[in-house]
């Protein structure tokens, strides 16, 4: 074999070796990505759902933050950790912990006094003198009585004239007394029972079949199907309030939006296993915030497009494509002022948190630190006026942005793009301009947590009642959740609020009547008074 042939053979072997090295490198990257996925799935299935840092997380993180470690473990001149509150008692110092002790029982609850005394015969001392009461030991225990049910029997007196049999009266032959109007005429359910059932289902996640069992123990024959029908009818009666809430949210400067899945069994033309969606929109003036849920078969852009028509404030969401598409469609309608779309740092943070959970990556930890510093700036709200806060937050946030973005770009160039860390870098960089937009207005915060917190009760409830039977039931759920969650935002007891509006809705005739029944136009004193 001549030299030329040997060189050619050597070249082929080198190329083959390079191809194998390349293939091996690709396989190693693929295996690493699969290991990340397995780790994330294990964390999702077995790990904690909270993104709060545990003590183990802190110890791991402090491997890269020795200065922070020293600060966290800092002791004062007495040798005590600075996080411990101290209380001077007489001649010694007692260490106490914050939020210590049992919370007091509400003074509004009725008290039943039981006084224990010694027998009269024991009130004489051995010396022959009468004992004197020098004090009392008082303790309180809570007694609870299961739901008390009573039947309200309404009797309407009827009168007639036996002389002329009504021929000489402008009224009909029989005059019947007027009775109180009810939300659902002809039903055996009083407004208080309706409020109880709706609260049990949509605040405490108790399905109707369990409610039916509880009522059966109390002697009330209301099957699950009847409770479902009552829920739908109640929601239909609340429809005017629901529509007012939607209009009200569009009057604010900011709308937070999110969506989650819901299964509806009997949707026309669809399988029972097909997923539908529950959308949530939170907003309105700062002192009159509201939440609206909307059910739809689709997760497409039509729902946000319809909801945002005519709205020109801020829209804060995650990076789901339907919101971007909805805004493009609004631009195509000729709407003069479009909503400005700002994205959520909590979602960007979540991507890095997943990497930290799966690999304890130093780079993921550093990214989390940058984002933590941005969120920490929100504490400045307490120290400045609105205008002062906006200026301070913007100046300090821009300093963080100026360090964070170049750091992201530099690391992204050397990080496998298909890995979890590479995807986190790319998500943040691709959405950078919309992520940093929140510093332009003090009404905005770095996260979309308002919408996520509003939708959380629905997600928790879904684990209990699992699905809605029909589209009517899903739409009714949207109305009930909207009223209950808005009432909770304004510190109203949902049962008292629902009882209040159910008793007054039959008498509401005008727009002003319905406006007065919205949660932010209602006070606790009004609920207690009637």
Image (tube, rainbow, N blue to C red):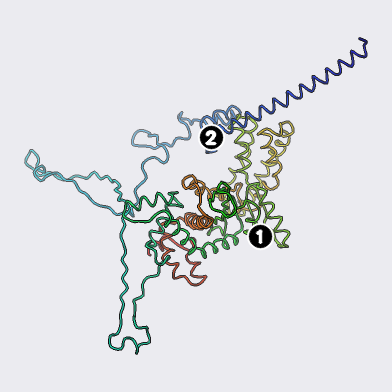
In the rendered image, which residue does mark 1 sit on? 312
Question: Residue 212: percent from the left, percent from the top?
Answer: 38, 52
Residue at disc 1, secondary structure = loop
Which residue is at the front of the view, 43 or 216? 216
Question: Residue 474: percent from the left, percent from the top?
Answer: 52, 54
Which residue is at the front of the view, 430 or 403? 430
Residue at x 46%, y 46% (from the top left corner)? 464
Quarter of the figure with the C terminus? bottom left
- Residue 102: image quadrant is top left
Residue at x 66%, y 30% (from the top left corner)? 33
Question: Residue 483: percent from the left, percent from the top?
Answer: 49, 58
Q: Residue furthest top?
A: 1
Q: What numbered label is drawn on residue 137? A: none
**Would residue 496 appear left or right of 63 to someone viewing this image?**
left
Residue at x 23%, y 51% (from the top left corner)? 113
Question: Residue 107: percent from the left, percent from the top?
Answer: 33, 53
**Would residue 293 appear left or right of 333 to someone viewing this image?**
left
Which residue is at the front of the view, 418 or 219? 219
**Would residue 402 appear left or right of 73 to someone viewing this image?**
right
Could you tell me how far apart the alpha carbons at marks 2 and 1 are, in whole angstroms? 41 Å
In the rendered image, which residue does mark 2 sit on? 45
Badge 2 crowding class, 10 Å Cα cut-off, few under 14, some 14 to 19, many 20 or more, is: few
Instruction: Judge whether 56 appears above or below 241 on screen.
Output: above
Instruction: Judge whether 415 appears above or below 188 on screen.
Output: above
Q: Residue furthest bottom?
A: 168
Residue at disc 2, secondary structure = helix
Instruction: Judge whether 336 appears above or below 19 on screen.
Output: below
Q: Residue furthest left?
A: 128
């Amino acid at each position: 074999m001549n030299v030329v042939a040997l060189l050619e053979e050597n070249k082929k072997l080198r190329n083959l070796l390079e191809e194998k090295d390349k293939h091996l490198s690709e396989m190693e990257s693929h295996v690493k990505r699969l290991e990340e996925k397995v780790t994330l799935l294990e964390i999702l299935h077995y790990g904690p759902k909270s993104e709060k840092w545990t003590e183990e997380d802190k110890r791991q993180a402090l491997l890269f933050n020795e200065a922070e470690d020293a600060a966290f473990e800092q002791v004062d001149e007495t040798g005590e950790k600075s996080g411990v509150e101290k209380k001077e008692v007489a001649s010694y110092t007692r260490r106490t912990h914050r939020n210590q002790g049992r919370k007091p029982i509400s003074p509004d609850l009725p008290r039943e006094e039981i006084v224990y005394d010694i027998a009269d015969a024991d009130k004489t001392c051995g010396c022959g003198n009468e004992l004197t009461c020098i004090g009392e030991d008082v303790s309180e225990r809570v007694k609870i009585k299961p739901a008390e049910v009573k039947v309200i029997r309404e009797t309407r007196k009827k009168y007639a004239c036996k002389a002329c049999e009504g021929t000489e009266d402008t009224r009909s032959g029989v005059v019947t007394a007027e009775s109180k109007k009810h939300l659902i005429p002809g039903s055996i359910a009083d407004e208080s029972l309706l409020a109880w059932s709706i609260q049990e289902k949509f605040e405490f996640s108790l399905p109707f079949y369990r409610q039916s069992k509880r009522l059966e123990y109390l002697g009330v024959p209301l099957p699950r199907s009847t409770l479902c029908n009552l829920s739908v009818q109640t929601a239909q009666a609340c429809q005017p309030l629901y529509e007012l809430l939607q209009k009200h949210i569009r009057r604010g400067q900011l709308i937070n939006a999110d969506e989650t899945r819901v299964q509806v069994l009997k949707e026309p033309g669809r399988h029972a296993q097909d997923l539908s969606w529950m959308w949530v929109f939170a907003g309105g003036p700062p002192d009159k915030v509201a939440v609206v849920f909307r059910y739809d078969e689709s997760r497409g852009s039509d729902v946000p497009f319809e909801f945002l028509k005519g709205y020109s404030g801020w829209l804060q969401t995650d990076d789901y494509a339907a919101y971007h598409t909805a805004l493009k469609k609004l631009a195509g309608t000729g709407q003069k002022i479009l909503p400005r779309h700002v994205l959520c740092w909590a979602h960007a943070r979540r991507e890095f948190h997943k990497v930290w959970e799966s690999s304890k990556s130093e780079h993921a930890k550093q990214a989390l630190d940058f984002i933590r510093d941005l969120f920490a700036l929100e504490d400045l709200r307490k120290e400045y006026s609105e205008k002062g806060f906006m200026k301070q937050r913007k100046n300090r946030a821009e300093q963080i942005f100026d360090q964070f973005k170049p750091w992201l770009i530099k690391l992204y160039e050397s990080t496998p793009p298909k890995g979890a860390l590479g995807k986190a870098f790319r998500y943040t960089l691709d959405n950078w301009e919309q992520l940093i937009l929140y510093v332009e207005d003090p009404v905005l915060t770095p996260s979309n947590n308002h919408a996520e917190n509003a939708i959380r009760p629905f997600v928790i409830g879904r684990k209990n009642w699992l699905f809605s039977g029909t589209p009517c039931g899903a739409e009714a759920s949207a109305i009930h959740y909207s009223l209950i969650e808005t009432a909770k935002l304004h510190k109203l007891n949902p049962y008292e609020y629902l009882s209040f509006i159910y008793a007054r809705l039959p008498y509401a005739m005008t727009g002003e009547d319905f406006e007065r029944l919205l949660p932010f136009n209602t006070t606790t004193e009004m609920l207690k008074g009637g």
